[in-house]
Image (cartoon, rainbow, N blue to C red):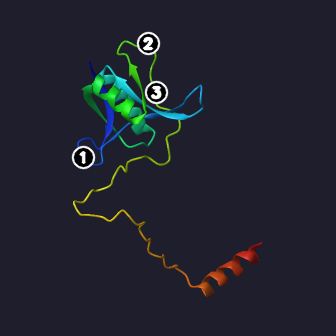
Amino acid sequence: MRVFVLMFNAGTENEGIHTIRRGDAYSGELRNTILMFESEDDATRYALMLEAQDFSTPTPEAINAEEIKEFCESAGYDWEIISENSNSVVTPPEVNVEQTDWQPDVEKEDTFEDTSRPKQQPAEEPDLSNSELDKIRRQLEGLL
């Protein structure tokens, strides 16, 4: 059976699939659930609702439902089929995760990067000297 899933950065090295985090009723553990839409129109509507929530806009992609189920089993994800003739409207959760597992605007380069050691962040130079900061601090304290 062909279904539609929502993909971010479809066809790139930084491709990601849209999931919803839900709590497991028995363990209380949060689990990722992939929505599989029977209708491309329903998938498109859901993608537009995500965009309205200032989330990156996903693209509905047609895929075999068995492939998604196999992926879910290997990744420890759940899945849910959204029927085309469903009377209830599926809407995204009110709150989105702060940090995704993929980066929406990352440009991948074809260069080797040593990931065995953490990257050293360059130290940021303060815009103001300590004496300037002390002067501002005294002025602010004078306002109190």
Task: From the image, state whether disc 1 or disc 3 is nearer to you.
Answer: 1
Q: Which residue is mark 1?
A: 12
Give the x, y percent position of residue 26.
59, 26
Give the x, y percent position of residue 12.
24, 46
Callout 2: helix, strand or loop? Answer: loop
Which sits in the foreground, 56 or 38? 38
Distance CA(mark 1)–CA(mark 2)? 35 Å
Neighbours of disc 3 within 10 Å: few (<14), some (14-19), many (20+): few
Give the x, y percent position of residue 92.
46, 31
Report the residue at 74% width, 76% height from top. 141
Report the residue at 32% width, 19% height from top. 38
Give the residue type at disc 2: Asn
| Quadrant in the picture for the C terminus | bottom right
Report the residue at 48% width, 76% height from top. 123
Q: Which residue is mark 2?
A: 87
Distance CA(mark 2)–CA(mark 3)? 13 Å
Q: Determine whether 108 is above or below 142 in the image.
A: above
Q: Which residue is mark 3?
A: 91
Give the x, y percent position of residue 34.
40, 30
| Quadrant in the picture for the N terminus | top left
